[in-house]
Amino acid sequence: MAPTAPPKAQPAATPTALWAAAIAQPATEFAPTALSVLEGQLPTGLRGTLYRNGPARLERGGTQFGHWFDGDGAVLRVRFDGATAVANYRYVRSAGFVEEEASDQCLYRGYGTLPPVSIWQRWQTQMKNAANTSVLALPDRLLALWEGGLPHRLELETLETLGLDILEGLRPSDTFTAHPKRHPRTGKIFSFGLVPGGNATLKLYRLSAAGAVEKTGTIPLSGIPLIHDCVLADRYLVFCVSPVRLSPLPALLGLSSFSDALQWQPQQGTQIIVVDADSLEAIALNAVDPWYQWHFGHSYLDFDGSIVFDVVRYPDFATNQYLKEVASGNIKTPADAQLWHYRIDPKTARILDQHCLIDRHCEFPIAIGQDETAVTYLNVHRDDSVPLSELFGAIARFDPKTGLTIADAGAGSYPCEPVPVENAANPEHPWVLTVVYNGYQHRSEVWVYEGHDLEKGPVCRLELPSVVPPSFHGTWVSQ
Ligand SMILES: [Fe+2]
């Protein structure tokens, strides 16, 4: 009898969901630290500051927060001077964070979190301003943004929290989006917030470049929707109000979280509202097919007077469940979105053209440029075989002339939203910055790419002093 060959060793399956370790423990702050170069070299022309904001703590006193959106915000600052990079990282000291830190108990409600109190006490508990979604850099301060309340004012270098900021015109009860838009020509800032009620009101703000409210407007809405982002196209704003509506009673009584009380009502369609950016009055409204979006990408006003914008479009609201599951470290719900291109008539809000630009799952688009030649940077999956349980493992560049170029970060590495940085000396060659969680080494890194040549990989990798969990949004300030 012939000897039996020993069974071949099976290759170990590629571990997945290594990102979960990045959010399993509260993140640790660090004071300004010169970053060591792991690979490559810092471009000498890269001078300025990267700020990023994201949920850094998803547990308090044994209570796990129920949604990724509820993590306490912490801001990362990385200062580049052409030779070195220095980073600091600090929690936003919101009143709720300070109180929970002192008591080591979950005392507040969140978007998707209910505190561990009796059902009779829940309706009395307040929402905590998580201050965790994005940042707005103003000449004299940095704002940590969260769409359910006022921004927090931070010191630009130390990231010290200086309190809530009313921007010389907001009321304490006002809300302020995490996606204000800066007009590329005038520097004016356009923003909005929802005022709840039986039917919510969309409150609009135009602010000076320095961040002082100059004009407000209001637009009545139907029910209480969720509006995360908007389009600015020169003299117009566009809101796409997806058919998500809050069932207010269960949320107000504390029977369910706000997140769980949001209902997908596709029969309502998505409402496109065109707003005159000068008067802040609605000028056109149109109901179209239903979709959900968190984010818009590139936008501009075309020569023929039509508004052009890109949007990351989901077929429904399953993305909210997906984001809830991220907080548990275990994603089970699929929620794929594609980048779509729209052209609408501002006088009627009617769609003149719509088509898909990127048919693979993507998010967090940021464009460089003002017209049809603008290039968009965004997150995509590494390839089509990525398991459901994974976060984004690649960044990409979409050029309308040449299509999609993908920079795969490699298995177990998770780049967050790529931030393009204009290169004044060579506008065709911007840099792209992203913060990557390296799941194999359990560390976070800052990666610098050359935007025109993403495929060759990062030209510089820098090691951060401690793990910075995946974050939502950031910005770049030159010099
Ligand atoms: Fe966002």
Image: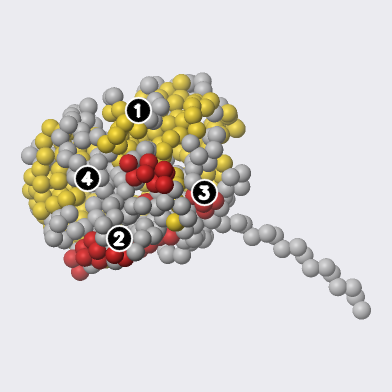
- Is the Cβ of the residue at disc 4 closer than 8 Å to that at disc 3? no
Q: Nearer the viewer, residue 403 or 14?
A: 14
Tell me which numbered mark, 3 or 2, is placed earlier along the sequence: 3
**Residue linked to disc 3:** 25
**Residue linked to disc 4:** 175
What's the CA distance linking mark 2 and mark 1? 34 Å
What's the CA distance linking mark 4 and mark 1? 21 Å
Residue 399 vertical position relative to residue 256 in the rendered view, above or below:
above
**Residue linked to disc 2:** 122
Percent across and percent down for residue 280 are 10, 42
Number of residues whose C-alpha sits closer than 10 Å to that of mark 3, classed few (under 14), some (14–19) or many (20 or more): some
Badge 2 amino acid:
Arg
Tell me which numbered mark, 3 or 1, is placed earlier along the sequence: 3
- The scheme the figure's colours follow is secondary structure
Tell me which numbered mark, 4 or 1, is placed earlier along the sequence: 1
Percent across and percent down for residue 339 are 34, 52
Secondary structure category for the residue under label 3: loop
Percent across and percent down for residue 138 are 28, 28
Residue 390 is left or right of residue 137, and the answer is right
What's the CA distance linking mark 4 and mark 2? 22 Å
In the rendering, which numbered label is found on residue 155? 1
What number of labels is visible?
A: 4
Front of the two marks 4 and 2: 2
Secondary structure category for the residue under label 1: loop
Residue 407 vertical position relative to residue 47 in the rendered view, above or below:
below
Secondary structure category for the residue under label 4: loop
Mark 1 CB within 8 Å of ligand 1: no
